[in-house]
Amino acid sequence: METCHSLDTTQDVWNLLETICRKGAEVWLENGRVHYKAPRHALDSQDVRDLQASKGQIAALLQSAAAGGSAGSKVSAAPGTRIAPLAFSQLAHWNLHQLGDRRSVRGVATAVRLKGFIDIAVLQKSLRNVVRRHSALRTRIGVSNGHPFQQIISSDEIEIPVFDLSALQPDALESEEKRLIRACLFARIDVTRDPLFAAAILHAGPQDHVLMLGMEHIISDGVSLNILLRDIFGSYVQGITTGDISAPEPVMQFAEYAANQRGAHARWLQEHGAYWDEHLRGCRHVPFPGTRRSGSVVPQGLALLQLRIDRDLTSQLRRWCRLNKTTLVMCMFAAYIAFILRRCRVSEAVFLYQSDGRFDPREREAIGYFAVRLCLRVGLQPADTLANLIGRVTDEYCNSYENMDFSYLDTPTPRPQYMRNTCFNWATRDADHFAIETPTGRVSISDVPFEHRVVEGVQTDAEPVLGLYEAGDEIHGQVQFQLSQFSFEAVEEVWQDFMAFVECLLERPDVPLVSVPIFAETVAAGE
């Protein structure tokens, strides 16, 4: 005998919606009531029973999506528009930054200069095609009974404004470019109301354009930015060559990844939960060095400090890595761990490493927040050299990957304090400069260097995040930090101290790490 499934949680409602959406059904909210339709024989009798029994819960879930619309607004769940749970990476991001109450920025962003002939209409069409292909770019965040969820809207029409700056003189042109880049890429947004993806084009001259792209981190990561650029310019070449743009959707969209991850969570807890409970037992928050003293009046906002490791030091690092059969990223990460432990005067801490979470080949062509924060518990032993520590960090990294710590990303507030610890991120950049060949000529594409040191009114509870990437024969990056907790001077001092520490490691690689000078300790001893 068939029975109605009891939907005890919001997750159960999501699971039901996902099931019937995959069968081609459509669910929407109209005049406060839930309606649905499906192709003949698409739904079985149990699906229909579950839908009938859970209309009230589905209505509550869809109500947030309908908020702000007219009384007769229709919010579709499929096809085209879907409801999906947040992936654990998204949920951690939501909790850490308290996005239900605070403003954010489209922080996964770039501005690229296009030198050569560009057909703006074809470029706009290419952007719309990519938005159609990648549902993450059409995602909004809804909230129902305090639970955030993904709402993927059905329309693929987006606004792609074009700003004509060609009449401006060079000095005014440069100033206006910088202003528009800041306005587009660092605008404060409410993730529950505003578009999470934004794009705009600057027309500076017949052979000179700037394309600006910004995505809130909750729908994207660094690898996704590479995919976005590749797909936009691949579509542009196709459009300018054939007059038509056609490309299949990725095999797996991010919303499906999120639903699959949630569905597998109970089994994951059975297999790996005990490991993490034991492995991270007794850990505590380790404050990043340079914290402002309490009681002082300080400015508010998210601050970005641009970083650069010059050609000579980068060359030395690469040479040392080749000799020691390790990678540049693991070398820098281990050195950073040793430096923070020394600077904070602790023997052990949990370090967060942001890594790509695309394990399934079907996920490699999709845009989304696949990146995950791995929790690495690392201690510094008296005899450790850099090579010793790299070996232990590598082992801990592999263990963390094997047991992938989803459960700790899903920990409700109040979260363990170590989740606020400083995070290390080695971003993957396909290229800072490349070119495409079109029937109308060669187009050179390069990053536009921009710097926005403070975004006012944006808050986070996280310690500073260090992000680095290889840029030709140098290493570039930035530190993102909260201005209420750290000053630019303090963060710059920590970075310079770290660079001096790295140089000492290369000069004396066999010396125990506990004996390598730390500038802050030297100053304190002198005082």
Image: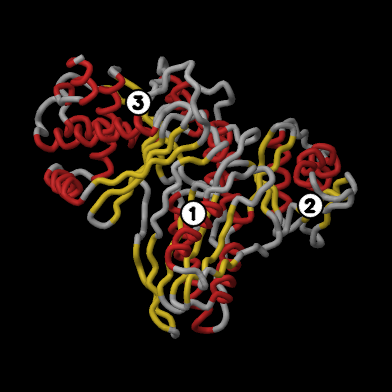
Q: Quadrant of residue 112?
A: bottom left
Inter-mark Cα distance, 2 to 1: 28 Å
Q: Does residue 279 appear in the picture of this structure?
A: no
Q: Residue at x 25, y 35 (%)?
A: 496
Helix, strand or loop status at disc 1? helix
Q: Quadrant of residue 445?
A: bottom left
Say which amino acid is labelled 1: Glu
> What mark, if any, has residue 377 been given in the picture?
3
Asked whether disc 1 touches disc 3, contact meaning CB atoms under 8 Å apart, the reply is no
Q: Position of residue 171 (x, y in %)?
A: 43, 63
The quadrant of the image that shows the N terminus is: top right
The residue under label 1 is 363
> What mark, if any, has residue 75 been given in the picture?
2
Q: Is residue 436 above or below residue 419?
A: below
Say which amino acid is labelled 2: Val
Q: Position of residue 115 (x, y in %)?
A: 40, 73
Q: Residue at x 76, y 40 (%)?
A: 61
Q: Does residue 493 appear in the picture of this structure?
A: yes
Asked whether disc 3 touches disc 2, contact meaning CB atoms under 8 Å apart, the reply is no
Q: Is residue 208 above or below residue 263?
A: below
Helix, strand or loop status at disc 2? strand
- Please name which of the two marks, 1 or 3, marks the residue nearer to the observer: 3
Q: Could you say which is closer to the camera, residue 218 or residue 89?
A: 218
Q: Position of residue 493 (x, y in %)?
A: 29, 31
In the picture, measured across the screen, residue 92 lies left or right of residue 472, that is right
